[in-house]
Image (cartoon, helix red, strand yellow):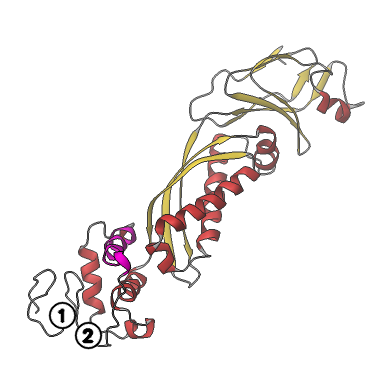
Amino acid sequence: MADAIEWTNASPDDVVWRYPDNRVKWGSQLIVMENQAAIFYRDGKALDTFLAGRHKLTTSSMPGLVGWLQKKVKGDVFEATCVFISRSQFQGKFGGRGQTSDLAPLMFHGNMWYRVKEPNIFVQDVVGNQNAFSTKKINDYLRSFMNERIIDEFAHFDLQAVFTQLDETSLKVKTKVRQAFERIGLELVDLKFEGIDTTEKYRERLFWLRTGGVTGQQVAGMETMKDAAESLGKSPGAGFGAGMGFMGAVSDQMKGGEQPQATPAGAKFCSNCGTALEGAKFCPNCGQKVG
């Protein structure tokens, strides 16, 4: 049982650390470094919180423990878990797979930056409730927490909205996730999507809906579907994250209020750029020879 309780070997990546001895002596010194907080935790409750400084543990400095202890003190020793929290900013990764409101598959991944804003809430709702007394467990929990919230929020938008209004959609998702983080004592400093995509089948469908003005049933029966898939596969950024690339090009075509013209079923399109051919031997847009 030490006379001084402190977290001396914290690395820049450490979020949380539990002091190894639950026996605490009245009169001990609690040393809390800058950008740290120390919380005494017992029986599912975060009790007293200490910020940076040197603190002498007495009944006056630990009012949260006094009511709980009552007759549980053995001499000058009581039992409680001391949890240290770093209040620095941390970076984490997320990524998962969900569905849009029209049941289209949606894959996403990215980075998040966060810090502990309310140590007391964080220790009680995350560290204690999840039994996450190590940085690894904290990171695993937050990654899962982030993925679940993003999946829930994207489920409110259809696939077309996700890709054609990406900035607006992602901002709404960020706002909801930030509110969820606040409820567990965290500040979500930033969230950045590095890739958002769907499956090849739904990329094809979305491509035709935005460029041809046709219905989903017409799209499903088009003979040129394979050509469209090959065209998309050759586009920059194809694969994971390709949704951002090809829909950015489609959005450029739509600027200025232009609306896609309805295209009859069975129409043929350029395998290079997707332009309607209308019987031409060469694509009027890119010059590709029609095979």
Task: State the CA–CA distance, disc 2 to disc 1.
Answer: 8 Å
Check disc 2 and report its element: helix, strand or loop.
loop
Above or below, 194 relative to 234: above
Spot occupied by residue 184 in the image (x, y as percentages of width and height): 64, 43
Q: How many marks?
A: 2
Query: Which residues are the magenta region?
Result: 243-257
Check disc 1 and report its element: helix, strand or loop.
loop
Q: Which quadrant of the structure image shows residue 121? A: top right
Spot occupied by residue 6 in the image (x, y as percentages of width and height): 64, 18
Q: Which quadrant of the structure image shows residue 124? A: top right
Q: Which mark is residue 41?
A: none
Q: Find disc 1 in the rendering and name its residue.
A: 277
Q: Which mark is residue 267?
A: 2
Q: Quadrant of the C terminus?
A: bottom left
Is 287 within the magenta? no
Can you see residue 96?
Answer: no
Tell which of 212 and 55 is nearer to you: 212
Q: Quadrant of the N terminus?
A: top right
Can you see residue 259?
Answer: yes
Is 250 within the magenta? yes
Task: Pick whichever of labels 2 and 1 is earlier in the sequence.
Answer: 2
Above or below, 155 relative to 114: below
Q: Which quadrant of the structure image shows residue 43? A: top right
Instruction: Please report contact status of discs 2 and 1: CB closer than 8 Å, yes or no.
Output: yes
Q: Give the residue type at disc 2.
A: Ala
Spot occupied by residue 244 in the image (x, y as percentages of width and height): 33, 58
Q: Give the residue type at disc 1.
A: Leu
Query: Who's the residue at 83% across and 24% down the image?
Result: 63
